[in-house]
Image (tube, rainbow, N blue to C red):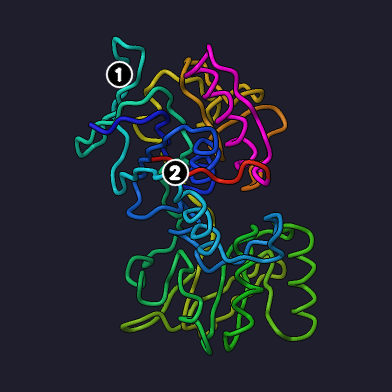
Amino acid sequence: MIETDILIIGAGPAGLFAIFQAGNINLRCSVIDSLPQPGGQLAEIYPKKPIYDIPGFPEIKAGDLIKNLLKQSEPFKPHFTLGERAETLEKTDDNKWLVTTNKGTVHKSSVIVIAGGLGCFEPKKPNLENLQDYENKGIDYIVKEPEKYKNKDIIIAGGGDSALDWTIELSKIAKSVCLVHRRPVFRASDSSVSTAFEMQDKGVIEIFINSEITKLEGTKCLERVEITSHEPECKILKHTDYFIPLFGLSPKLGPVKNWGLNFTKDLIIVNPEDMSTNIQGIYSIGDISHYPSKLRLILSGFYEATIMAHSAYKYIYPEKKLSVSYSTVKGIKPLN
């Protein structure tokens, strides 16, 4: 049995920063994550993708952000249980929680923090007849190693931030990049959309709107895709080395959904004052938490981790007064 003050379910950026914030006030953390390495979606889906809205870093790769968060948590000696899913929840006689994973690992803690992003996830796939024939043979749903696409012809489908960001980023190394979106308006940030259309005007990339991929062709690997434009009606057969559909992820919450928490549309309802749920001793932070005016940003998760840690301390030690001071004054004191 692994005993700790706070058990964090989810090793994404919010969960990792929670280790630091809890450690700063002498609370020890353990972490469970179904993925084989810490980092959540940042590590699993787009480790090489640049992020621009982290304070103090004009640009940082997602994977590097995770490395920094792990290094920041090292003085507090967190215990990681990776490649396992939190399954069952029980309350003990001494008012603590027991969580058992699908592989039988048991954690005992005073507080539980659910920081599981949007849960377990899988990519949303386009409805194409022979899609499976070309998976890992020219079709990728995740960009893990951008160098793989160097000097290659690439077609990206999608209308969100991920599709626009990778179109812009891969255009720097690819032979050609074509972006296909089935609607006339993109769902990405205005700056990314403006940049993409400016690049099209300069002949750096191609953009097809009101269009979709309707056919895949090739012998052993993907060689061509059919792009069907709806306004005006026409079909184009285009050579490609890689087709990358970026339609988002389908979240799957798993057993946590059965723990008695209050949900709205697969999001856990919390009190924004302390990130507590309807169950005393259980908190939620990051993308999976919900409250009015919630912004699903990494930065928001960092703030929520800070609020949660201080509230958890008061829950665990109601008789103690927590003295808050700047890290520049007290420094970092490792846990033994």
Residue 302 percent coordinates (x, y): 61, 42
Name the residue nearer the viewer: 165 or 107: 107
Q: Where the C terminus falls, by quadrant? A: top left
Q: Residue at x 30, y 23 (%)?
A: 98
255 with respect to 55 (left or right): left
Residue under label 2: 76
- The magenta stretch spans residue 238: no
Check disc 2: other Cα within 10 Å, few if <14, some if 14-19, many if 20+.
many
First along the sequence among labels 1 and 2: 2
Q: Percent from the top left, x then y, of residue 224? A: 47, 82
Which residue corresponds to the image point at 66% horizontal and 23% vertical from the top-left? Answer: 273
Measuring from the top left, give residue 132's x and y in whole percent: 34, 65
The residue shown at (64%, 61%) is 51
The quarter of the displayed image where residue 257 is located: top left
Front disc: 1 or 2: 2
Q: Do the residues labelled 1 and 2 touch (CB within 8 Å)?
A: no
In the image, residue 308 above or below residue 295? above
The answer to which quarter of the image holds residue 8 is top left
Q: Which of 312 and 260 lies nearest the eye of the viewer?
A: 312
Secondary structure category for the residue under label 2: helix
Front-most of 54 and 157? Answer: 54
Secondary element at tag 1: strand
- Which stretch appears magenta? 300-328
Residue 5: x and y in percent read 40, 28
Amino acid at circle 1: Glu
Whether 323 is drawn above or below 157: the answer is above
CA neighbours of label 1 inside 10 A, class few (<14), some (14 to 19), many (20+): few
User: Residue at the left extreme?
Assistant: 104
What residue is pinned by disc 1? Answer: 90
